[in-house]
Structures are given as structure tokens and as C-alpha cells.
Image (cartoon, rainbow, N blue to C red):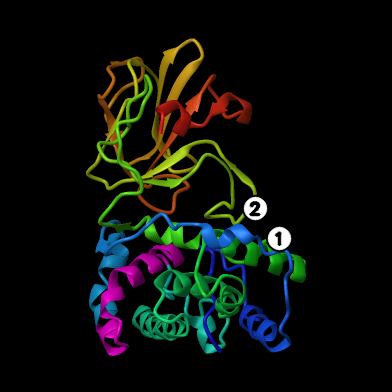
Amino acid sequence: MKKLGCLFLIPVVGMGLLFLGIMMTVTGENDSSVNEDIRDEEFMYEGDYRFNGVSPEIERYRPFFEKYAKENGIEDHTEILMAMTMQESGGRLADVMQSSESLGLPVNTITDPEESIQQGVYYFSTVLESAGGDTKLALQSYNMGHGFIDYANKYNNGEYSQALAQQFSDHMKQRLGWNVYGDPNYIDNVYRYLDTNEPDYVGEGNSEWTLPLKEIRITSEFGPRTHPITGEVNSFHGGLDFGCTPSDDILSVKDGKVVEAIHSNIGYGNYVTVKHGDNEFSRYAHLTSIGVRNGQSVNQGDSVGTCGTTGSSTGNHLHLEHMTELGQPHNAKKDPRKTLGL
């Protein structure tokens, strides 16, 4: 049996995925609804991978990752493996790579982190081989099962795309009658823990708002998406996410007055809201630390805090919102990408 990845801490797929993936190949099932434009999609991350944002709980296992990556001949994927483990468990479960299922066992049966890493690295190496060395295709297949590789071979010339992952997830949900099948955003969620040679977007912007970070890498867009933690489909994302590290200052996008400086371990986590006008607010969420106080005036470019992963977050990033009123109504939120002129 092969491992079926989980959606962060919530196991949503179970052992039936691999069987179903195999059956799709055996039966030669055809899905006529595959979109032709899937082949044209470009993936947003490229370049060499370097360690960036895994937690100390994962970093302490680095010797195990290096050991078993070497044993399986995939030393160049060590950082990817650690980033995967951040997405799978954050280091908060004994079965850190959620690899029990690859042995045909129930979720979290493995209770030794080294054993979990040994098995998880081995399993990923087999998926990587089946994917012809394509890291992105292997990652998504680690999450969705080998059936995704077969699906990609059949409908997208054996290549990964996020649209294809969504297509496969939707297809399997419909087929099984499930609400959730895997995580179509798995690769984005894994890559947020990595640094790359080139950020997704670096620029000056073109508006009255300036960039909230010195260099930006957009990791999640405004609008409907599959929630990275709950797996809810078409969950409304009321802001724009930027990858960052705990040493990065978060900068006020415009002159204004701090109207919220909230410390919390849920939802937005630690966050700051700045009022720029009667119907104009910016909010900066998931901060490690807050550097301003309620009622304080700030200038454009002033630091309001530092990047973090507090609250409901799967990794270090800034969640930036543009609001026309305080609170959380969807109709009071605008796409920050447009406001920033990106």
C-alpha cells in the first residue's frame, strides 16, 4: 500500500484513494470535462530550494531527513521533505510525515518520529520515481495518491498544474460523494516554507498604497479558494497572502492611525488594523509581534510588526486586507492586489 497525504492536520482522504487511483488506470476511465487550458498554466514557483520557514519542531529532525534522503538517493529534496512535514503535521504529531497509511495502517499508528520520517521519505522517493522525477507532480501525488499521476499522464502530458489538481479533486469528490478530496493547493501550502531563487512577484506597485514588505511573494490570492486548514471548498479568502520570514518587518501601506492592535492565538492571530480614511482600512494578520499601539499614528512604510504564523495559519506569511469598514463582512473587503496596483 502507498501513502495518501493528508490535508495538514485533518486526515481527509483515507486508504481508498490509492485503490481508486489504480482502478482509474485499470478501467481506463475517461473524464470528458477536462479543461483544455490546463496545459497552459504556469506554476508560480521555480528555482533551487533553500531552507526557510520550518519550525524548530521540524528542524530538530533534520539529521533524520538527511539520513533517509541519502539512503533513498534524493538528498537534493531534503528541504522539500521538511517543508512537506510542516504541512503534514507541523511537528506536533508523532507520525510527523503522516506515513502510517503507506504501510496500510490507520492514520497516526506510527508513534516514533524517526520511523515516520524513514517511511515517509521512502514513500516519497517511490512517488518521485513514478512521477519521472517531477517534484511538483510527486508532491501532489503524495497528497492525493498515485491516481493523480495516472490522471496527469492521461490529461496533461504527465505534467502538474494546480488547475489539474483541482480538476482531479472535483472529479473524485463527485465520484465518491465526498465534500473534500485531498488538497488542490497542497504545493502552494508546502512551498510557503521554502525560499526560492526568484520570488513570485517583486515590484513597486502602482497606487497610493505601497508594498507591505520590502520584497513580496504572493502565496494566496483574494477570493474563493479551498481552505488550507479545513479543506472547505470555495471558502472566501478576504485578503492577499505574502510569503515572509519572522525577521521581516510588516510595513504600513499608507499614512493612518492604528485602530486595532490585537494579540490573539486564533483567527487572525496577532493583527493590526490601520485607518487611512472614513472608508479605508488596512489589516495585517498573523504577526509574530506587534510594534504599534492602539491610537498611534503611523506613516507609510512604518513597521507595524513582524511576520509570523499566529492564529489560524499554516506557515509564516502576511495576510493583508483592504476594508471599507471594520469587521469581517465580505462585501466590505477589496482585493489588495488591485489596491496595490500589482
CB within 8 Å, label 1 to label 2:
yes
Q: In the drawing, does residue 216 fall left or right of residue 131? A: left
Q: Is residue 242 above or below residue 272?
A: below
Q: SS for tag 2?
A: loop
Quadrant of the frame with the C terminus? top left
Residue picked out by circle 2:
233
Q: SS for tag 1?
A: loop
Residue at point 29%, 87% (across, down) = 73
Q: Magenta part mainly helix, strand or loop?
A: helix
Looking at the rendering, the stretch of residues picked out in magenta corresponds to 67-92
- Seen from the viewer's position, the closer of residues 206 and 39 is 39
- Seen from the viewer's position, the closer of residues 21 and 35 is 35
Relative image position of residue 317 (x, y in whole percent): 37, 45
Mark 1 surroundings within 10 Å by alpha-carbon count, few (fewer than 14), some (14 through 19), many (20 or more) = some
Q: Which corner quadrant of the image does residue 273 belong to? A: top left
Mark 2 surroundings within 10 Å by alpha-carbon count, few (fewer than 14), some (14 through 19), many (20 or more) = some
Relative image position of residue 134 (x, y in whole percent): 41, 75
Q: Is residue 18 above or below residue 239?
A: below
As drawn, which residue projects farthest toward the top? Answer: 278
> Is residue 91 visible in this depiction of the protein?
no
